[in-house]
Amino acid sequence: MRLSDFIAQHVDRIVDEWEKFAATLTPAASSMDSVELRDHAKSILLAAARDMNTAQTKAEQIAKAQGEELNKTPTLDQAAASHGELRHTVGFDLVQMTAEFRHLRATVIRFWVESLQAPDMASFQDMIRFNEAIDEALAESTAAYAERVNRSRDIFLAILGHDLRAPLQAVSMSSEVLIRKARLDAASLTYVERIKSSSRQMATMVVDLLEFVRSRLGISLPVVRQPMEMASACRDAIDEATAGHPNCNPVFNHTGDTHGEWDRNRIDQLLRNLIGNALQHGASSHQITVTLTGDEGYVTLLVHNNGEPIAQEAIGSIFDPLVRSANEQEGNPNPSTSLGLGLFIVKEVVNAHGGSITVTSNFGDGTTFTVVLPKKA
């Protein structure tokens, strides 16, 4: 009997074995009934049998073995993807879910081989096609499972970031009240100022985290354009960023008309992260130069610092989320307090405004980030 026919004829017996094995995958399986344990096993098996009966050339077989989309089976993919999602929902880990497919493969082959009287070349071809189908199902289940893991993590981070804002705001407001109304000696005032500064830094990290999660969940960065003056925003950002570096003597140059329509809150994020990055990864003197040029339809912002340049192999990934510089990983004496999201947020803000950002970095010239933003949408 051909393997596809054997699967269709003995599908319930095979699924019984699936259920017995799935029941051993504790602790999640301990509270599951028979229907939940069997899940999409029958659908996967019958779809695999149908896939095995479709015509396939040698080239198509090779392409499928390499994971290409050619001649995939929609019903098999749908059943496998649903299985991966549900196994994540009920608490199976990824190793347990993949073990189900390993056991299924072994069970089918064992039952079928036991039924064969005299295997021939067609039998070997059947085994190849069956393994292809199971591999496709396993890949779809794993992808769906991983997507659920990622989304669950992102939702957790979003909730965490959201819930952290209230206590941070309370800390910040309390420190502000103490500074204004309490009669504090010099030492106590220093401590309260430090609390206020630290809560502000933590709030910035929470905002960056929420923006990262927003992008991960497929939500574009919203911008509300209003008339503003970019040079003023640059001065405010420089003052805020350098408040913790009393020895820093930043240079700010601006020419031309720097009025335009941008989202001021987003621009503040961009400037705060770019300038903070320059201070963090520049030379020990924390010397930075910010240059702003206004032209007819756009402004160009350059943020420059000296110090250890960015490795050329890292340039391509510097705007990726959760990427930390090689210098920091090797033990920078000024370790960052960020989440590695600063430049990712910068890129998102630039993209939301329809602009562009580039970076150059070498030993002779230092590191320069160049942002070009149109003045209007």
Image: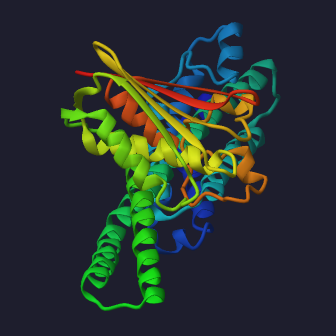
Q: What is the tally of numbered marks visible in this picture?
A: 0
Residue located at (67% from left, 25% from top): 129
Task: Examine the rendered structure and indicate whether residue 86 appears above or below residue 192.
Answer: above
Residue 69 in view of the camera: yes
In this picture the colour scheme is rainbow
Question: Residue 145: percent from the left, percent from the top?
Answer: 51, 48
Question: Residue 182: percent from the left, percent from the top?
Answer: 28, 89
Question: Residue 342: percent from the left, percent from the top?
Answer: 50, 46
Using residue 139 as the reference point, say whether residue 210 is left or right of it. left
Q: Quadrant of the N terminus?
A: top right
Residue located at (57% from left, 67% from top): 23
Question: Residue 107: percent from the left, percent from the top?
Answer: 69, 48
Task: Examine the rendered structure and indicate whether residue 123 appears above or below residue 218.
Answer: above
Looking at the image, which is closer to me, 110 or 152?
152
Looking at the image, which is closer to me, 362 or 325?
362
Residue 212 in view of the camera: no
Using residue 44 as the reference point, say whether residue 221 is left or right of it. left
Residue located at (24% from left, 86% from top): 181
Looking at the image, which is closer to me, 153 or 272?
272
Task: Examine the rendered structure and indicate whether residue 53 appears above or below residue 170.
Answer: above
Q: Quadrant of the C terminus?
A: top left
- Answer with the quarter of the image where residue 366 lies: top right
Residue located at (56% from left, 32% from top): 48
Task: Examine the rendered structure and indicate whether residue 57 appears above or below residue 75.
Answer: above
Using residue 55 as the reference point, say whether residue 121 is left or right of it. right
- Answer with the quarter of the image where residue 166 lies: bottom left
Looking at the image, which is closer to me, 269 or 190?
190
